[in-house]
Amino acid sequence: MRKSLAGTRIREQRRKVGMTQKALAKASDISASYLNLIEHNRRAVAGRVLLGIARALDIPAARLADGVESALMGDLHEAAAHGTEGQAEIGAIEEMIGRFPGWAHLLTTLYRKTRDQEAAIAALSDRLTHDPFLAESLHGMLSNITAIRSTANILTNIKDIDPAQQSRFHAIIHEESRRLSDAAQALTNYFDHATDQNSGTATPEEELDGFLSRNNYCFPQIDDPESAVTLADIIANDPNLKNREARVLVAETLAIYQRDALQMPLKEFAKSAAEVAYDPSNLARLFSTDLPAVFRRLSHLNRPGSPAPPMGLIVVNAAGHALVRRPLPDFALPRHGNACARWPLFQAFSRPERPIAALLELPNQQRFICLATAYPTGSAGFGESLEYQASMLLIPQQHNSIIESWLPPTGSAQQIGTTCRICPRADCQTRAEPQILALESAR
């Protein structure tokens, strides 16, 4: 379990405002020796002491408390492995976050952009290889060039060509040149359009994630039945949505949100959810819907003024591709690469439409209640196979008292990670990639 970094943040903030350790201890009504232990992370700090120190430093207590997100830690570990091997001091990442949070966030932002740009380059490379328009355009241009070259060769090497034939060859060169010019212009326009559409955020998925995060994953305009705001208005009013494909993804996401809101109106759903202790099965029966829809609605409940516990959500297809991501601060949900194979999310595919409840424990010993299920995306005709998606709802264990009335026994905690690359569990039998953390011990 990682040590507290609150002391490091207190020390850095004290130095920033120019206070001595003695002065801060006096203002906080604690001894200087006790403050010294706190600042060196040898004593935990919380409650009255934390509030007193925060008051003396004139900053919110939340800025000093342990709130390091696991996603930030994971991204820094990935960034370390992404760069030149052996250059980054992986063992000092926690200290860096505690002492220089601004730099830590800047580095992770730059790393995410680099990672997403690489994903965009891979997508464009794949497009160059498989896009039928490009293949057809290039084939047509080669045909035009071949025709022009062959005709020009005839005119150059044959001296006594009949004037009528010569005129016909000139017409062929003119026509093929015009077609070549048109094809080149169409190809240029195509690439210009692709460049404009991919400006800003590297991938459509990245823009979708940013859009949802900016809106805190909830949309009061859609939840209000009397609102005149349309889905198109919501999209048009966000200047950060520059990618046409991203706008399509956002429109699809908002349409699903709207469908859920119509079937499970916010006020009625929130009231019913509180009455049944947020039991998804009970809510599915009350609103005549399926568990995945209830999972989505529950993940949107936690918002300012709502007593609902925070809930994370991830939905994947049978290939493991993330379709929906609603991360929690301490449970990172990867967008690129594969998630932990131990997640019940993937086990749900082997027992479709049979809900799974489990207690999960991350390597930092944080625990989460997990509810997972796999449901078909539609109906199948005779001789056809059903397509399934799996959904996993995550609830921090500290909210267990709210849901324990209906939660079935989960047994002992299942040891999981987020992704193999940043998981320190060296003895994991399902590991698919080497762990980055091993780099530090090997140095």
Image (tube, rainbow, N blue to C red):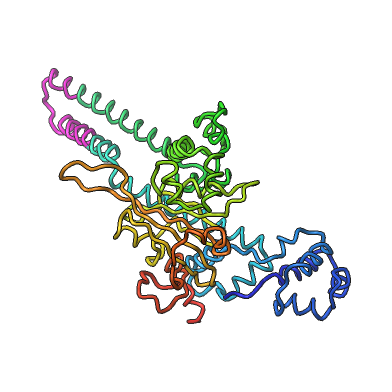
- Identify which residue, 110 or 356, lies in the foreground: 356
**Residue range of the region highlighted in magenta in the rendering:** 143-169
Identify whether 331 is placed above or below 1: above
Magenta stretch: dominant SS?
Answer: helix
Q: Position of residue 377 (x, y in %)?
A: 32, 45
**Residue for point 35% across, 60% down:** 346
Q: Is residue 247 visible?
A: no
Position in image of residue 168 (x %, y %):
16, 21
Question: In the image, residue 439 lies at what x, y percent?
Answer: 48, 76
Q: Quadrant of the N terminus?
A: bottom right
Reply yes or no: does residue 392 show up in magenta.
no
Q: Residue at the spot x=22%, y=32% of the render?
A: 148
Residue shown at the point (33%, 33%) measured from the top left: 184
Please give left or right for residue 237 compared with residue 279 in the image.
right
Q: Residue at x 75, y 75 (%)?
A: 39
As displayed, is residue 256 above or below residue 415?
above
Examine the rendering and report whether any part of residue 376 can be seen: yes
For the residue pair 103 and 321, the one nearer the viewer reads as 321
Q: Viewer-proximal residue, 174 or 360? A: 360
- Counting from the top left corner in percent of width and height, residue 394 is at 49, 58
Depth order, front residue of 36/205: 36
Q: How many marks?
A: 0
- Specify the quadrant of the image occupied by residue 151: top left
* Residue 218 as seen in the image, left or right of residue 431: right
